[in-house]
Amino acid sequence: MNILLLGSGGREHAFSRAINQSKHFSRLFIAPGNAGTSNCGENVDLNPLKLDEVYSFCVENKIDLLIPGNEDPLVAGIVDFIESKNLEFGTSIKVAGPNKFCAQLEGSKDFAKAFMVKNAIPTALYKTFDATNIHESEDYLKTLTPPYVLKADGLAAGKGVIITSNFQEAVDTLNEMILGGMFGSASKSVVIEEFLDGIEISVFAIGDGENYRILASAKDYKRIFDGDLGPNTGGMGAISPVPFADEVFMSKVENEIIKPTFEGLRKEGNPFKGFLFLGLMNVAGQPKVIEYNVRMGDPETEAIFPRLKTDMIEMLLAIADGGVDQLALEIDNRTAATIFLVSGGYPGDIEKGKIIQIDETKNKENQFIYHAGTKLTNGEIVTNGGRVIAVTSLNSDIKSALSDSNELAELINFDGKFYRRDIGLDLLKYENESI
Ligand code: AMP
Ligand code: GLY
């Protein structure tokens, strides 16, 4: 089984490791990959958004299965593109990911909101504005209780959501987004929505077009500093599972959100194949959708995959070929705590090229190191981005998993290393409740 994985983050290193451990593994390419993925397969200099080049690479290297790790190629329509090439040239490259229609769930907030309303999926009230109706936006904002939530319709690298309690600031920001090109073409259209007060949680599912299965829950920590302070980042850590996601909560998530999502897409003639990521707010026990993503999360993947005992290639083939319902899905009951080690100054300007020292000799069986912003230069591993390395530990509860991850974080050193010390501490009260 020859596989091409697109991406270069901690998520892709976690995919690579799991693929390496599969009994069906033969060859893995990662485009472009990082220093960690180069130990699991061959990193290749290929731009995932150059769809023609990706297809040619697949043909030349006899790729059986393509896995888009992040959203950009999916939203650009890589699945439809490969399928049309398969038809045209008689190739049979499988892709474990959703088509362009389904990828709009992530690629357009307006599409996602309209889909949820149509399928009665619980979410915040909203209205979409662009240059043609911006004059009505102040009246709409007045109907809402602050804080105001403004979301760029298109992909904005996780930065397209602005929340402010100040009415004038909301009006000015909306103008800046729609008319001033604050997020380029991504903010030509903006969704204004009701603020949801609660605690966030992500739930992941896989689908093969006919069937779906729930993988796991996780909580992501987005702000740079302890206590959820400071600017947003790509994610500073994660915990899986989330202790308040008990049976009652998860059955609401499944029946009110996941099932109608898969059914709704099937009814539109576009069944969902791939990983579905539900960003939810738990509003007093009621899950509501904040956002859809059509791929695994980062750093949630680094917390969930160490818990997954299922053969990764079998799971990916079940997604691509069907049979997700028959899959022997097995998840470790232990808790995973993931901490991201980031470069000094992140999420602002950072310096790359710092030498990374990793003392792997003290690693335990329950500890995992996932590279993200790293690369090999003259035989040394150096920093190559804001989020550098994610460390994960599995243990019986959050505190002990966290303590193991803190230990691991101290075995890795580079100039300017920074990480949060409070990942998961907000969840301890729920963990005690559930015992
Ligand atoms: P998103 O990029 O859609 O995940 O939004 C970024 C962050 O903004 C989320 O992780 C939430 O913390 C917050 N957020 C988004 N929508 C809402 C909402 N309707 N109410 C409260 N917070 C929100
Ligand atoms: N952890 C959030 C994301 O992957 O979008």
Image (cartoon, rainbow, N blue to C red):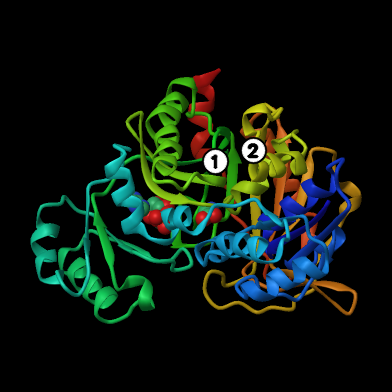
Left/right of residue 174 with respect to residue 269 in the rendered view: left
Look at the numbered disc 1 and give the secondary structure of its residue. loop
Nearer to me, 403 or 348:
348
Q: Can residue 310 be seen in this view?
A: yes
Q: How many labels does the image show?
A: 2
Structural distance between the alpha carbons of marks 1 and 2:
7 Å
Rendered location of residue 126, percent (x, y): 23, 52
Mark 1 crowdedness (10 Å alpha carbons): few <14, some 14-19, many ≥20: many
Marks 1 and 2 in Cβ contact (< 8 Å):
yes
- Is 254 drawn above or below residue 319 in the view shown? above
Outermost residue, bottom side: 180
Left/right of residue 37 with respect to residue 244 in the rendered view: right
- Is 33 drawn above or below residue 403 in the view shown? below
Q: Residue at (85%, 41%) from the top-left corner?
A: 364
| Residue type at tag 2 | Gly
Look at the numbered disc 2 and give the secondary structure of its residue. loop
Left/right of residue 55 with respect to residue 129 in the rendered view: right
Q: Is residue 402 visible?
A: no
- Is 62 drawn above or below residue 378 in the view shown? above
Q: Is mark 2 within 8 Å of ligand 2?
A: no
Rendered location of residue 378, percent (x, y): 89, 80
| Residue type at tag 1 | Gly
Instruction: Find disc 1 in the rendering and name its residue.
Output: 209
Instruction: Find disc 2 in the rendering and name its residue.
Output: 322
Rendered location of residue 161, percent (x, y): 36, 62
Residue 365 lies in what quarter of the image? top right
Rendered location of residue 393, percent (x, y): 72, 41
Disc ID at residue 219: none
Q: Quadrant of the C terminus?
A: top right
Residue 356 lies in what quarter of the image? bottom right
Mark 1 / mark 2, whichever is N-terminal: 1
Outermost residue, top side: 435
